[in-house]
Image: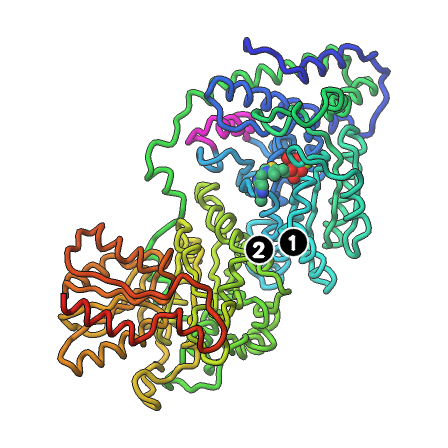
Amino acid sequence: MTDKRAPLDDHFLAAVAAQQPGTRTSSGLDAELLALFDAQATSRHLDFAARQLGQRGLGYYSIGSSGHESNAAVAAALRPTDPALLHYRSGGFYLRRAQQVPGQHPVLDVLLGVVASADEPISAGRHKVFGNTALSIIPQTSTIASHLPRSVGLAFALGRAEKLGVDCRWPADSVVVCSFGDASANHSTATGAVNTALHCAHQGLPMPLLLVCEDNGLGISVRTPPGWIEASYRDRNGLAYFSADGAAPLDCLRVAQQAVEWTRTHRSPVFLHLRTVRLMGHAGSDVETAYRSQREISADYDRDPLLGTAKTLIEHGLLAPEQVIDRYEAKRSEVAEAVEEALSRRKLGSAAEVMAAICQDRPEAVAERASTAPPRRESPTSSVEQGERLTLAQAINRSLADELERDRRVLVFGEDVARKGGVYGVTRGLRKKFGASRVFDTLLDEQSILGTALGAGLAGLLPIAEIQYLAYLHNAIDQLRGEASTLSFFSNGQYRNPMVVRIAGYAYQRGFGGHFHNDNAVAALRDIPGLVVASPSRPDDAAAMLRTCVAAADVDGRVCVFLEPIALYHARDLHEPGDNRWTAKYPEPGTGHVPIGRARQYGTGTDLTLVTFGNGVPMSLRVARRLRERGITARVVDLRWLSPLPEADLVRAAEATGRVLVVDETRRSGGVSEAVLTTLVDHEYTGAMARVTSEDSFIPLGEAAYHVLVDEETVEQAAWRLLKE
Ligand SMILES: Cc1ncc(C[n+]2csc(CCOP(=O)(O)OP(=O)(O)O)c2C)c(N)n1
Ligand SMILES: [Mg+2]
C-alpha cells in the first residue's frame, strides 16, 4: 500500500525496534501471548485499512479498535460458544475468537463490513458490525448501552430455558459477555440493566453475565472523571469486580480468566474493568487535537496494548524484535490482500435486497401454527365455562392460557402480571396454573421487561411481555425500535428475537383518567419497519389475533405489539345495557385464525364506509345503527391491524360505497387516519373521504378528557356531512 503510515504505526515499529532482545523465560502463557499478538496486530491493520479505504471514498466506517485490542484477552478466556454482545471497538476480541473456530475468515469479514459489501457474513452489507453466528457474536446497533438489557435478558434466559427443558442454541453453562465503553456506562439503559442483573442475582436467579467496561477515559471528547468507573462499580453488592491493565497482556489474560471463571461457576454477574486507551481518535473523522493536547495523545502510545504484548513477547525471549516486526508486517500484507478481495465483492443491489432481512413473512406457515389446536385442556383456566360469552379481558386471558398450555417455550411476564393477575385481571390465574417459572412479575423497569423478552427470544423461548400502559412503553421504546426490530436486519435474518408485547392502551376509561392511563399515541409504533401492530377490539378477535401474533413470532421471528383497549376490557354491552353484544364466545384453538393485515367488516351497507379500530369500533357500530334508523346503510370496517394495514380490505370496502369516514381515536397528527387516507389515495380511490380524530393533545383528567377525544356525536355529524356531499 502506498498510503502514508499513521503516526501510531511508526511509533509501534520504532518502539519495537528499540527493544533489547530478551532471554528465554516462560511466561506461563507463551502460546496464548502469540495468539493474542496475532489477533491484536491484525485488528490494528484492519483499523489502518478502514481509514485508508475511507480516504479513498471506498470505506464507510472508521471507528476503530486501536488501544482496545486487550479485549482479545477476554475472548481468550471465554469459550467461542459464549454469546457475545460487543462494544464497537472489539476487533481484538473478534479476531481472537475467530482463531478458536476452524474455517473462519475474520479479516475479510471485517473489511466486507467496512466497504458495505453484500457478501459480509452477518449484516450482508447493511452495517459495519461485529457479528457472526459461528462465533456466537450477536451484532449490535450504534446506540450505546442499548444492548445491556438484552444481555441481562439473555443471561437470565439461559437458566430459564434449561429449567424448562427448552432447546437453546447455546450450552446451558454459557456465560454472556457484554462490553461497552466508560461513557456508555453512565447511560440510564446501562445503569438500569446492571440494576436488573443485580436484582435477579439478589434473588438467587442465575445471572452468568460478564460485563466488560472498556475504559479509555473518554466519550468522544468528554472526559470520564478519573476513578469514576472504579468508584461506581468496585463495591456493588452482588457484583464481583475485577480490573486489568490493557497494556499488560499477562495481567489481562489472568484477570479475564478469573472473571470468566467466577461468573461461570457462581452464575452471578461480574464486572471486568478493562483499562484501555483510545488511539487514533474516536473515528476517522474526529480531529482529536481540538480537545486534547498533542502531548496527551502521544502519551497514550506508550499504553498501546499491541506494544504491550510485543514487549512481553520480547522480554520473555519468545520473539526477537525483528521477528515481532516481521509478524506485524505479515499481518499488514494479509490485510492488504483482503482489501483487494473485499473491494471486488458485490454491494446490495436494490431496495428489495436491502429490505429482505427486515422480517420473514410466511403467512401460510403462520396460519398453520395459529390454526392448529393444542392438546385439549383438561379444564378451562379461568372460572368461565366453555361456550360462555367472554369479555375482552377474559378472552385474552383464555388465549394466553392456551398458548402457555400449547408450548412450554411461552413465558408471560411484566409488572403485576403474576400474583395480582394484571392491573385489569387479564393474566389472572395464569401463574397458579403454569407456575412462577413461566408466569412471573418483573421489576419496575420497562427497558428491562423488553430486554428480558429480547434475551428470551434469542435463547429459544417465546416471550409474551406486558407493558402496563402505552404511556410507559414510550420511555423504553428503543428496546423495540432499535433493538428488537433491527436484529433481523443487521444479522440478515440469522438472529431473531420473536416476541409479543401486550400493551394496555387507548382512552375512554370512565373513572380512571389522565394522560398516562389513556395514552393514544401510536405513531412511534407504526413507523417501525417490520413491527406488527395488532389492535383488537372485540373478544373473539383478540383471542384469535393473539394466537396469530404468537404464531408469527414463533414461525417468522416477528416482533408483535398487541394493543389492548383498556376501556373495552370489561365491556359487555354494545347498544343497550344488558344486550351482551360486546361479549363473544371464545374461538377455540383450531377453529381458524385472523391473518395479519386482514380487516373485519360489519354489515354490507352501501351508503357509507366507516373505517375504524379499537374503541372506534363499538362507537361506529352505534352510529351505524342510528344512521340506519334514518334510512342510511353503513358498513363498518375494523382494521384490526394498524401495521401492516389491511390495504386490500380497506380499498375494497371504500370502493363498495364511494364514501369513507375514518373514525380514529388516536391523534390528528401522526394518527392512524393519515395512513388510511393515504392508502386510499395510493390505490387511486376517487370517492369521497373524511376523517374524525382525537385532538393533538395529551388527555386531561376527568370529564375534560372528552373535549379532546373523538365522540359518537362528532362521528355522526361527520357522517351526515359526507352523505350530503
Ligand atoms: C444513545 C447514544 N447517544 C449518543 C451516541 C453518539 N456516540 C457514539 S459513541 C459515543 C461515546 C461513547 O463513549 P464510550 O462509551 O466511552 O466508548 P468509546 O468510544 O470511548 O470506546 C457517543 C456519544 C450514541 N451512539 N448512542
Ligand atoms: Mg470511552
Splitting the image into 4 quarters, where does residue 276 fall?
top right
Q: Nearer the viewer, residue 586 or 571?
A: 571
Question: Can residue 121 be seen in this snapshot?
Answer: yes
Q: Amino acid at mark 1?
A: Ala
The x and y percentages for residue 226 are: 79, 38
Q: Amino acid at mark 2?
A: Gly
Is the residue indicated by label 2 positioned so its CB lies within 8 Å of ligand 1?
no
Which residues fall within the magenta stretch?
104-120
Q: Which residue is mark 1?
A: 193
The x and y percentages for residue 330 are: 62, 15
Q: Is 28 left or right of 422, judged from the image as shown? A: right
Q: Quadrant of the N terminus?
A: top right
In space, the residues marked 2 and 1 are separated at their CA atoms by: 8 Å
Q: Which residue is mark 2?
A: 451
The x and y percentages for residue 514 are: 50, 71
The structure residue drawn at horizontal position 59% and vertical position 24%, both measured from the top left corner, is: 47
The structure residue drawn at horizontal position 70% and vertical position 26%, both measured from the top left corner, is: 292
Q: Is 674 left or right of 699, judged from the image as shown? A: left
The x and y percentages for residue 288 are: 65, 25
Colour option used: rainbow
Which comes sooner in the sequence, label 2 or label 1? 1
The structure residue drawn at horizontal position 40% and vertical position 43%, both measured from the top left corner, is: 357
- Check whether the beta carbons of the residues at disc 2 and disc 1 lie within 8 A of each other: yes
